[in-house]
Image (cartoon, rainbow, N blue to C red):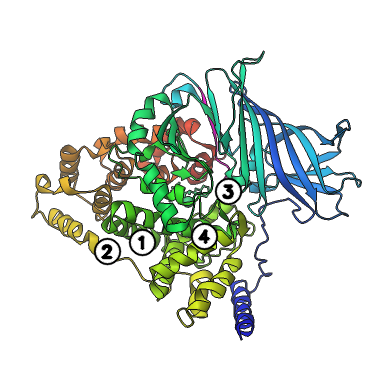
């Protein structure tokens, strides 16, 4: 009976898939279209790096030893992903034999994919072998940002950090750059004396003394198998402060006090997530607070999340982002999207976990506000997206995986889980999630594997709770299904009333009850202003609350959007400063977009961008280059 049901269900899924791809060749779930690697012929099992950090040349140089298993005895060519790498030599390293050099070739570059590195592997290699690639990176490597001392908090030392997700690991390591392949890794990083290297791995002993070149060796080991996009490095004037025995913060000395204070709840967050979703399996959990040019809010590098300093608001009001990156230690790092089509398995689950942590630590009201703000962003985003890009399982063939990074995998993905919760109850869903993380721990899975597991476990226990057509609507259809349980916007009703009163003139600026407002309430107040506001009223807001100078980067952002729409010039000096220091794409892109809507704004945008661009991360640069009609 069960088997029959499952067969019928599998049939339905197949039909859904066929419908999804009508008119094109069918999508093959689980096949990563963003890698050159021939993963069925060879599998990389372990990566060992030995790299020297050269701030003057802006290069990493050294070698990567890949432990490779041959899965197909007939396969002769090992194909790896690279992008802008200079490969000097490739050799085979076998126990008791001298290294043998291997023939290799770099194939043609393909737009955002980089170039395949094709290595001839001798026939007599059976089982596992170590392939050594001697190489160096280019200064323009898309996965690395090299900062001048002026771009750091301390202004004295240069800084380097990586951002490998989605497909940028290949710009600093030659490997199989696909999340369906998991590797353990180890590394020796030679960094200039006086600086410190950190990685997303256990930190081993560093050499006490520099070598003849003035470089100090730092050692790292990641014993759990992870996808390539989680390999991460940073080098700079970095210090550490413990928050609890297993948590702490790394950052520049000048930021350490503020960071330690802002993230004082870190241990409580880990403990909360463990209680809800099972053991934390990575040993330590630390944060690395980056310089302000970091392109993302956060990146869930295992054991060491990389975090934008723009979440340091002084009042811990933006720490949901920390809950988010921490939650990836379950959804994403433990159970990983096998391809970028399945990105919603990482992000949708993580937003759901994040909201649960926020609710447990800061209360239901705060979580409701985050939910309501999330829904607003999702709805604004849906209004702009092509229908096909509104599917949870997105077709990214021929496209940069970054195109899939919209509110859909995040907030629609989360709403799917909240929908399941509404049908089976929270207790049942929690049990399911814990079992899911256990069942697929340290594996990479694709959408249909999750759906099969959902049907076989949760839905088999609750027959009739969820219809196949409902699952299909969530995963393979645009928009929000009618059955979605949308968060109530009721929490913001008082703010809406206050805003209306203020706009109507019945409530004076000085009487706005802002003392009681959380950051979330401020954001709702500002983000839902009408397009046009008289300059005198803007003056009042600015004079009373000094919004342009807000320490809270999110509030300042929302205010600047209003200022730009209304060409409110008094805000422009601070806006310029903001765009000159902050590189977080989510915060700066909308500001440039808004500016570009008028000729005068466009002129300002261009003049700021000309000065700000060298300080932005390559990812932010390429997004803004496209927006500003600039090439390279
Ligand atoms: N993993 C993402 C960041 C990412 C996604 C980098 C895709 C590259 C490609 C990270 O967990 C994330 O979602 N960060 C968000 C913050 C979060 C609270 C929504 C960000 O950076 O804004
Ligand atoms: Zn995320």
Residue 495 is situated, as x and y percent measured from the top left of the image, at: 19, 56
Look at the numbered discs 2 and 1 and tell me whether their residues touch, using CB distance below 8 Å: yes
Q: Residue 358 has which mark? A: none
State which quadrant residue 197 falls in.
Answer: top right
Closer to us: 352 or 556: 352
Q: Real-space Cα distance between discs 4 and 3?
A: 13 Å
Q: Which residue is labeled 3 in the image?
A: 166
Q: Residue under circle 4?
A: 344
What is the C-alpha distance between the residues marked 3 and 2? 33 Å
Q: What is the span of residues highlighted in magenta in the rendered image?
A: 158-166
Q: What is the number of the mark on residue 375?
A: 1
3D distance between C-alphas at marks 2 and 4: 24 Å
Check disc 2 and report the residue beneath it: 489
For label 1, the crowd category at 10 Å Cα-Cα, with few meaning under 14, some 14 to 19 and many 20 or more, is many
- Image position of 21 with respect to 499: above or below: below
Q: Position of residue 232 (x, y in %)?
A: 57, 38
Q: Does the magenta stretch include residue 359?
A: no
- The kind of secondary structure element at disc 1 is helix
Q: Which residue is drawn at 87% across and 45% down?
A: 125
């Amino acid at each position: 009976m069960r088997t029959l049901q499952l067969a019928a269900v599998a049939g339905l899924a197949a039909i859904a898939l066929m419908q999804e791809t009508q008119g094109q060749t069918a999508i093959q779930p689980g096949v990563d279209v963003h890698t050159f690697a021939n993963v069925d012929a060879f599998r990389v099992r372990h990566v060992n790096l030995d790299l020297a950090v050269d701030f003057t040349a802006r290069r990493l140089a050294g070698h990567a030893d890949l432990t490779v298993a041959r899965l197909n005895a007939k396969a002769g060519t090992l194909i790896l992903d690279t992008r802008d790498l200079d490969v000097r030599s490739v050799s085979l390293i076998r126990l008791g034999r001298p290294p043998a050099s291997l023939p290799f070739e770099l194939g043609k570059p393909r737009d955002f994919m980089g170039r395949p590195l094709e290595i001839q592997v001798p026939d007599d290699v059976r089982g596992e072998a170590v392939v050594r690639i001697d190489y160096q990176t280019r200064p323009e490597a898309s996965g690395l940002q090299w900062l001048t001392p002026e771009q750091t908090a301390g202004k004295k030392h240069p800084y380097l950090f990586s951002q490998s997700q989605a497909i940028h690991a290949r710009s600093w390591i030659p490997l199989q750059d696909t999340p369906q392949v998991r590797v353990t890794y180890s590394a020796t990083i030679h960094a200039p004396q006086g600086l410190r290297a950190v990685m997303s791995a256990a930190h081993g002993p560093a050499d006490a003394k520099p070598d003849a070149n003035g470089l100090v060796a730092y050692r790292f080991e990641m014993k759990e198998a992870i996808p390539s996009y989680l390999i991460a490095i940073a080098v700079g004037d970095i210090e550490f402060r413990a928050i609890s025995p297993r948590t702490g913060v790394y950052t520049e000395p000048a930021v350490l006090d503020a960071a330690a204070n802002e993230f004082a709840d870190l241990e409580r967050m880990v403990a909360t997530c463990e209680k809800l979703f099972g053991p934390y399996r990575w040993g330590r959990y630390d944060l690395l607070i980056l310089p302000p040019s970091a392109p993302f809010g956060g990146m869930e590098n295992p054991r060491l999340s990389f975090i934008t300093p723009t979440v340091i608001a002084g009042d811990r009001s933006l720490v949901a982002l920390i809950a988010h990156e921490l939650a990836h230690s379950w959804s994403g790092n433990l159970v990983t999207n096998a391809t970028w089509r399945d990105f919603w398995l990482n992000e949708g689950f993580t937003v759901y976990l994040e909201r649960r942590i926020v609710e447990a630590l800061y209360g239901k009201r705060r979580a409701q506000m985050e939910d309501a703000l999330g829904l607003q962003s999702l709805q604004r985003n849906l209004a702009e997206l092509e229908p096909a890009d509104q599917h949870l399982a997105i077709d990214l063939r021929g496209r940069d995986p970054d195109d899939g990074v919209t509110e859909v995998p995040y907030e629609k993905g989360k709403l799917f889980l909240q929908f399941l919760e509404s049908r089976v109850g929270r207790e049942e869903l929690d049990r399911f999630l814990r079992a899911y993380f256990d069942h697929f721990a340290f594996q990479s899975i694709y959408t249909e594997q999750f759906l099969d597991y959902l049907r076989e476990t949760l839905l088999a226990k609750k027959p009739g709770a969820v219809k196949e057509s409902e699952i299909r609507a969530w995963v393979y259809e645009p928009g929000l299904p009618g059955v979605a349980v949308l968060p109530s916007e009721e929490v913001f009703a008082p703010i809406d009333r206050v805003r209306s009163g203020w706009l109507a003139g019945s409530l004076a600026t000085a009487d706005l009850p802002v003392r009681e407002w959380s950051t979330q309430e401020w954001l709702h107040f500002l983000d839902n202003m009408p397009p046009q506001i008289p300059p005198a009223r803007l003056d009042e807001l600015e004079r009373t609350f000094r919004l342009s100078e807000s320490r809270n980067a999110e509030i300042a952002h929302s205010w600047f959007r209003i200022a730009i729409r209304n060409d409110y010039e008094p805000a422009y000096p601070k806006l310029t400063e903001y765009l000159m220091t902050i590189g977080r794409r989510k915060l700066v892109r909308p500001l440039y977009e808004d500016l570009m809507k008028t000729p005068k704004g466009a002129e300002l945008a261009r003049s700021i961008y000309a000065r700000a661009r060298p300080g932005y991360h390559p990812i932010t640069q390429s997004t803004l280059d496209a927006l500003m009609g600039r090439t390279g």
